[in-house]
Image (tube, helix red, strand yellow):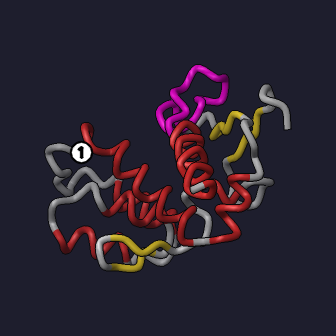
Amino acid sequence: MTDQSVINFYSVSDEYGEFSNFAAYSIKLKGKRWPTSEHYFQGQKFQDAGHREEVRKAKTPMIAARLGRDRKKKLRRDWESIKDNVMRGAVMAKFSQHDDLRELLLATGQAKLVEHTTNDAYWGDGGDGSGRNMLGRILMEIRDKLRVQETN
């Protein structure tokens, strides 16, 4: 892959769908197994342990996402300031706990990873490249960290 290559991902059924937080790879964090990184991320929005557990036990990542967006439940006060680091932790857990995913991520070389969707201009690219693509950026950070670990 050239340094200029771009890899778009979004749907779990597409190529590189494994990069989606909805991909069916469980992670173990904070002493619990979470069905997907989406479950973990959405659960961390809440101070209340009961709300977190409800999200963890959601049958699908879509249900977990819906529960996480429920504004009838009180978000933790610091959520906006910690959400990127929560996502970093989830992505690191996912790609370090599954060898096949680590290999897939490392095989992307220096390609730019982009969550390509009109549905999200913060975690994704907004569909037209105007979004922040924070999930793609975090994946590239984790890729760099994993690469360093492999050489040590």
What number of labels is visible?
1
Residue picked out by circle 1: 79
Q: Nearer the viewer, residue 49 or 93?
A: 93
Q: Residue at (80%, 31%) from the top-left corner?
A: 5
Give the image quarter of residue 33: bottom left
List x then y, in percent, for residue 133: 55, 33
Extent of the magenta region: 120-134
Tell me if residue 55 comes above or below residue 84 in the rendering: below
Left or right of 70, for residue 58: right
Q: Residue at (65%, 37%) from the top-left corner?
A: 114
Residue that sits furthest to the right in the current view: 1
Tell me if residue 25 comes above or below residue 139 in the rendering: below
Q: Nearer the viewer, residue 1 or 13?
A: 1
Q: Specify the amino acid type for callout 1.
A: Trp
List x then y, in percent, for residue 34: 42, 74
Q: Main secondary structure of the magenta part?
A: loop
Tell me if residue 61 comes above or below residue 125 in the rendering: below
Q: Residue at (70%, 52%) from the top-left corner?
A: 106
Q: Nearer the viewer, residue 41 or 95?
A: 95
Left or right of 151, for residue 121: left
Element assignment for label 1: helix
Tell me if residue 43 comes above or below residue 16 in the rendering: below
Give the image quarter of residue 56: bottom left
Q: Residue at (62%, 50%) from the top-left corner?
A: 147
